[in-house]
Image (cartoon, rainbow, N blue to C red):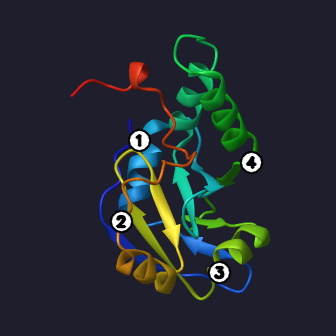
């Protein structure tokens, strides 16, 4: 399974193409399933959640096991999967992000990639700075995201 760590800021051109950090590409290309990324709009922040293809296939396969998801979690996982986009790498390691996702997240000019373990996020750098300046609210429930792999299927530590 891919592991994404670190922060990287890369340029975004007028068409919405951005280079995925080389460390992240190396993790993704190790999987050999799909030469690209899967992205979905983050439900809790002005960012995109992203992962490799293997991750999304594991979440999808887990949906077949009625023991792993309660009905609400299953609905949320299905919604995240159905609204995700497959973005293949071009010959330069860039992906073309759909304009609606760029507009929804205010990503233009540059994008900040944040590794969060099995997934990563793509942010407008200013929005990420504002997000980090906001105090964490532990009473707020976690929203649906590409991190939806149920506990029973997660690798043990």
Q: Which residue is mark 4?
A: 83
Find residue 53 and report its image quarter.
top right
Q: Are marks 1 and 4 in contact (CB under 8 Å)?
A: no
Indicate the position of residue 31 as horizontal and vertical percent values: 46, 37
Left/right of residue 140 with respect to residue 79 in the rendered view: left
Q: Which mark is residue 69?
A: none
Residue found at x 21% / y 28%: 157
Q: Earlier in the sequence, mark 1 or mark 2?
A: 1
Left/right of residue 48 with respect to residue 87 in the rendered view: left
Q: Which residue is mark 1?
A: 30
Q: Which mark is residue 106?
A: 3
Q: Label 1 to label 4, Cα distance in Å?
A: 25 Å
Q: Nearer the viewer, mark 2 or mark 4?
A: 2
Q: Nearer the viewer, mark 3 or mark 2?
A: 2
Q: Nearer the viewer, mark 1 or mark 2?
A: 2
Q: Which residue is mark 2?
A: 136
């Amino acid at each position: 399974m891919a592991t994404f760590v670190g922060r990287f800021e890369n340029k975004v051109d007028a068409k919405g193409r951005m280079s995925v950090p080389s460390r992240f590409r190396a993790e993704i290309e190790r999987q050999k399933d799909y030469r690209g990324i899967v992205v979905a709009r983050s439900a809790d922040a002005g960012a995109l959640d992203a992962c490799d293809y293997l991750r999304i296939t594991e979440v999808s396969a887990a949906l077949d096991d009625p023991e792993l998801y309660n009905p609400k979690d299953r609905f949320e996982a299905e919604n995240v999967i159905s609204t995700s986009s497959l973005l293949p790498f071009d010959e330069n390691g860039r992906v073309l992000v759909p304009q609606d996702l760029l507009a929804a997240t205010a990503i233009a000019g540059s994008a900040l990639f944040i590794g969060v373990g099995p997934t990563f996020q793509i942010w407008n750098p200013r929005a990420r700075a504002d997000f980090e300046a906001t105090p964490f609210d532990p009473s707020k429930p976690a929203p649906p995201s590409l991190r939806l792999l149920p506990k029973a299927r997660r690798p043990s530590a």
